């Protein structure tokens, strides 16, 4: 069990990093209130820093000046060997040119491997920025599941309304879609929950684990923004 101080020590405000060891990290961007609203992967290799993410419209791998990053925080992923970071960047470069994600609160255990999208679902590449990161990480782990996604189940009225609104648009271009099957993959894993997953190395990571870290992370983000 992590203490509040241990959680805070391992959460880095990205613009404060200094030259040092290479890493792959889960990053979040917070809004002006300190709420984590976007997820990506922050990568440092040979003193260059890259940001890999899905921004609802396209997949981008950009070299960035991290000193200019505002309200960006990251937690290093210990499950990715630093010796393999060059290979991880190549993994990302291939995905940047082949992935065709569509935005939606869905994730059913899919992943990108050698640039190819693998899924048991017949539907398009439906995902959020969080789901995209999970696809990328899982595909690099060589058949190891990063998170146990089935732990995240939609139970709220808001989630049900979202699904009905999504289906109204989705069916216009996918008239033969099995909507009940689609609903099985509907889930929202929040940016703060993905960030919390970075504190664990025993795979697959369970929601019961991330739930022990997420509240402290959210408090720390809000205390460090503004």
Image (cartoon, rainbow, N blue to C red):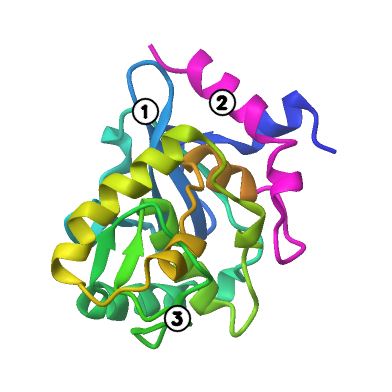
Left or right: residue 88 compared with residue 115? right
Kindly identify which residue carries mark 2.
Answer: 218
Q: Residue at x 63, y 50 (%)?
A: 197
Q: Residue most toward the right? A: 1
Q: Is residue 116 above or below residue 192?
A: below
Q: Earlier in the sequence, mark 1 or mark 2?
A: 1
Residue at mark 3 to residue at mark 1: CA–CA distance? 34 Å
Q: Residue at x 39, y 79 (%)?
A: 91
Give neighbour class at mark 1: few <14, some 14-19, many 20+ (Cα, 10 Å).
Answer: many
The percent position of residue 57, horizontal first and vertical second, equals: 17, 56
The percent position of residue 147, horizontal first and vertical second, equals: 63, 62
Q: Is residue 108 above or below residue 221?
A: below
Residue at mark 1 to residue at mark 2: CA–CA distance? 13 Å
Where, by quadrant of the figure, is residue 75 drawn? Answer: top right
Q: In this picture, which residue range is highlighted in magenta?
A: 198-226
Q: Is residue 84 magenta?
A: no
Q: Nearer the viewer, mark 3 or mark 1?
A: 3
Kindly identify which residue carries mark 1.
Answer: 71
Say whether marks 1 and 2 touch (CB < 8 Å).
no
Residue 119 is tagged as 3
């Amino acid at each position: 069990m992590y203490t509040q101080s241990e959680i805070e020590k391992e959460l880095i405000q990205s613009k404060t990093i200094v030259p040092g060891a290479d890493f792959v990290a889960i990053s979040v961007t917070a809004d002006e209130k300190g709420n984590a609203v976007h997820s990506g992967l922050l990568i440092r290799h040979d003193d260059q820093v890259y940001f890999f993410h899905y921004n609802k419209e396209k997949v981008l791998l950009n070299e960035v000046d991290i000193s200019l990053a505002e309200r960006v925080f990251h937690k290093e992923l210990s499950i990715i060997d630093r010796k393999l970071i060059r290979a991880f960047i190549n993994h990302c470069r291939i995905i940047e040119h082949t992935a065709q994600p569509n935005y939606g609160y869905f994730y059913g255990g899919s992943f990108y491997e050698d640039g190819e999208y693998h899924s048991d679902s017949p539907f398009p590449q439906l995902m959020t920025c969080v789901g995209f990161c999970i696809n990328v990480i899982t595909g690099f782990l060589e058949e190891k599941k990063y998170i146990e996604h089935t732990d995240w189940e939609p139970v709220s009225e808001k989630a049900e309304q979202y699904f009905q609104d999504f289906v109204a648009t989705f069916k216009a271009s996918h008239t033969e879609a099995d909507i009940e099957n689609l609903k099985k993959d509907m889930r929202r894993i929040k940016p703060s929950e993905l960030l919390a997953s970075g504190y664990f190395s025993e795979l697959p990571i369970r929601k019961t684990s991330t739930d022990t870290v997420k509240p402290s992370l959210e408090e720390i983000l809000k205390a460090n923004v503004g």
